[in-house]
C-alpha cells in the first residue's frame, strides 16, 4: 500500500510539473529547492515567483514564471520530502548521458529508498506515466491504452500557451529553442493529444499577458 501511494504521489507531481512548465525530463529531474527564485518587475515593483531551469540540451539557463497551480504542486513536493529539521535533504543525481554523478543538492524529485536518498530516474518517470495511464483506463480511438512521454506534455504545454495568445517567439524562449521553426513544429495538433481532446492546461488572458510582459522585460 505504501509503495502504491508513493508511486501515485510522484506520478501526480511529475505530470503536473511537466504540464505546467513544458520542461524536458532531464530538466525536471535536475530541479532543486534553490531553483525557486523571485523577480521584481522594474515598472511596477511587483514580485513574481520564477523557476530557474539549469542548462541542459542547449546549455542555456532560463527562467519560467511560476503559476499558482505550479506553486501549489512544488510546495506539496517540498512538504513531502522535508526532513525532521525542516530542510530539503541533499542528494546527488547520476547523469546517464554524461556518466557522472553531480554534486549533492536539495533536489525536489527525490525519494527515500531504504536509508538512502535517490533522485528519480528517467526510467522511473516513464514507468510511472505508463502505470498511471493503465490504471486510468483511457484509450485512444483504436481502443489502445494511451501512451505519453514527458515530451508529449512539453508539446501540450506550449500549444495551449500559443493558443491562449502567447507569441511564438516568447514560447520559443520558454522552451529554450533557438529557432522558431523548432517551436512551430511543436504546434502540430495531431501529435499533441492522442485522445483527440484539448489539454487541461488553461491560460487566462491575464496569465498570458503576464508571461508576455515578463519575458519581454527579460529579453
Image (tube, grey):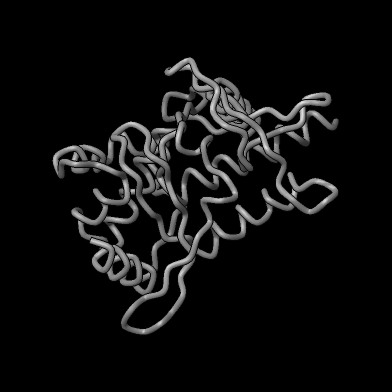
Please give left or right for residue 18 compared with residue 73 in the image: left
Vertical relation: 20 (above or below) 90: below
Seen from this angle, which residue lies furthest front?
103
Of residues 36 and 121, which is closer to you in this image? 36
Residue 60 picture location, percent across and down? 31, 41
Image vertical order of residue 55 relative to residue 86, above or below: above
User: Above or below — where is 122 with respect to 33?
Assistant: above
Q: Quadrant of residue 191?
A: top left
x%, y% of residue 105?
A: 61, 39
Where residue 42 appears, as percent x and y from the top left, is 33, 78
Determine the image quadrant of residue 193: top left
Q: Residue at x 75, y 35 (%)?
A: 6
Q: Outermost residue, bottom direction?
A: 44
The image shows residue 24 at horizontal and vertical percentages of 41, 36
Count of marks placed on residues = 0
Judge left or right: residue 7 versus residue 47: right
- What's the residue at 85%, 48% (across, down)? 84
Please identify the quadrant where the N terminus is shown.
Answer: top right
State the quadrant of the C terminus. bottom left
Residue depicted at 34% across the width and 65% down the height: 211
| 61 and 194: which is toward the camera | 61
208 up-or-down from 130: above or below: below
Residue at 44% from the left image edge and 54% from the top image edge:
201
- Which is nearer the eye, 64 or 72? 64
Amino acid at each position: 500500500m505504501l509503495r502504491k501511494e508513493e508511486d501515485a504521489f510522484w506520478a501526480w507531481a511529475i505530470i503536473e510539473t511537466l504540464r505546467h512548465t513544458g520542461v524536458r525530463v532531464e530538466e525536471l529531474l535536475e530541479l532543486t529547492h534553490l531553483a525557486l527564485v523571485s523577480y521584481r518587475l522594474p515598472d511596477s515593483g511587483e514580485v513574481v515567483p520564477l523557476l530557474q531551469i539549469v542548462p541542459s540540451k542547449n546549455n542555456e539557463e532560463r527562467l519560467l514564471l511560476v503559476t499558482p497551480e505550479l506553486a501549489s504542486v512544488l510546495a506539496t513536493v517540498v512538504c513531502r520530502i522535508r526532513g525532521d529539521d525542516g530542510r530539503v535533504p541533499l542528494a546527488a543525481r547520476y547523469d546517464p548521458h554524461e556518466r557522472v554523478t553531480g554534486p549533492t543538492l536539495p533536489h525536489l524529485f527525490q525519494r527515500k529508498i531504504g536509508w538512502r536518498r535517490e533522485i528519480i530516474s528517467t526510467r522511473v518517470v516513464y514507468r510511472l506515466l505508463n502505470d498511471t495511464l493503465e490504471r486510468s483506463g483511457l484509450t485512444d480511438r483504436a481502443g489502445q491504452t494511451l501512451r505519453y512521454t514527458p515530451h508529449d506534455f512539453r508539446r501540450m504545454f506550449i500549444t495551449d500557451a500559443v493558443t491562449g495568445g502567447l507569441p511564438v517567439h516568447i514560447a520559443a524562449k520558454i522552451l529554450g529553442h533557438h529557432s522558431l521553426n523548432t517551436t512551430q513544429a511543436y504546434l502540430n495538433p495531431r501529435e499533441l493529444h492522442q485522445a483527440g481532446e484539448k489539454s487541461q492546461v488553461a491560460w487566462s488572458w491575464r496569465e498570458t499577458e503576464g508571461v508576455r510582459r515578463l519575458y519581454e522585460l527579460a529579453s
